[in-house]
Amino acid sequence: MKTRILLFLLGIGLLNSCVNDDNADYQSTEINFTEIGKGALFGNGQEGISQSNLTISNTNEWQNLISQMNSVNNVSENFTETDINFNEFTVFAIFLEVKGHGWEIGTENVIENENNISVTTLENEAINSVMTQPFSIIKIPKTEKTIIVE
């Protein structure tokens, strides 16, 4: 009887040691990002960009976005860069809704989790009476993961 109990306990121990627990060891890490542009569109929605979060992974999408943003005012002249190597980087753009009183949005940090990339933002209200559409555009190392905004 003792032999059977010992074999049973040994079998349970072996089964437990075979459990794959690789996912439990995943550590979220902060990703360095580059701010390409931050500001507001002043066309009162005439640019045709709705409130959205856009992941841009190729030059064609990027150039189309720049053209759309520049359709009322030349916003991209204030970008830190417009020539992006999409073999190495992904661009992420956040557009808020058109707002009164001059809001702005900024990217606080970017965290890579096991299944996604999390972007934390901060919205601030400025004091003016102009209708604006705040935006923040960043680039991060190339990723295929879903990007979410917190």
Image (spheres, grey):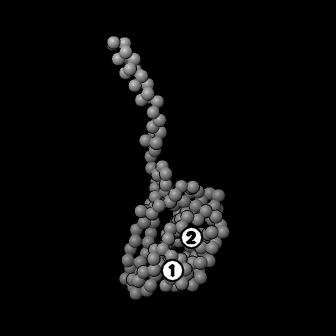
Q: Residues within 10 Å of mark 1 (few under 14, many from 20)?
A: many
Q: Give the Cα separation between the discs numbered 1 and 2.
A: 17 Å
Q: Secondary structure at mark 2?
A: loop
Disc 1 target residue: 41
Taking the spot 56% from the left edge, 70% from the top edge, the residue there is 80
Is residue 69 visible in the rendered image? The answer is: yes
Taking the spot 65% from the left edge, 67% from the top edge, the residue there is 59
Q: Residue 126 location in percent, x, y? A: 38, 79
Q: Is residue 24 left or right of residue 79?
A: left
Q: Residue 60 location in percent, x, y? A: 66, 69
Viewer-closest of 87 and 96: 96
Q: Is residue 27 above or below residue 88?
A: above
Q: What's the residue type where badge 1 is placed?
A: Leu
Q: Is residue 124 above or below residue 31?
A: below
Q: Is residue 141 left or right of residue 121?
A: right
Taking the spot 58% from the left edge, 65% from the top edge, the residue there is 56
Q: What's the residue type where badge 2 is placed?
A: Thr
Disc 2 target residue: 80
Q: Is residue 130 left or right of residue 87?
A: left
- Hey, which residue is sitting farthest left in the picture? 2
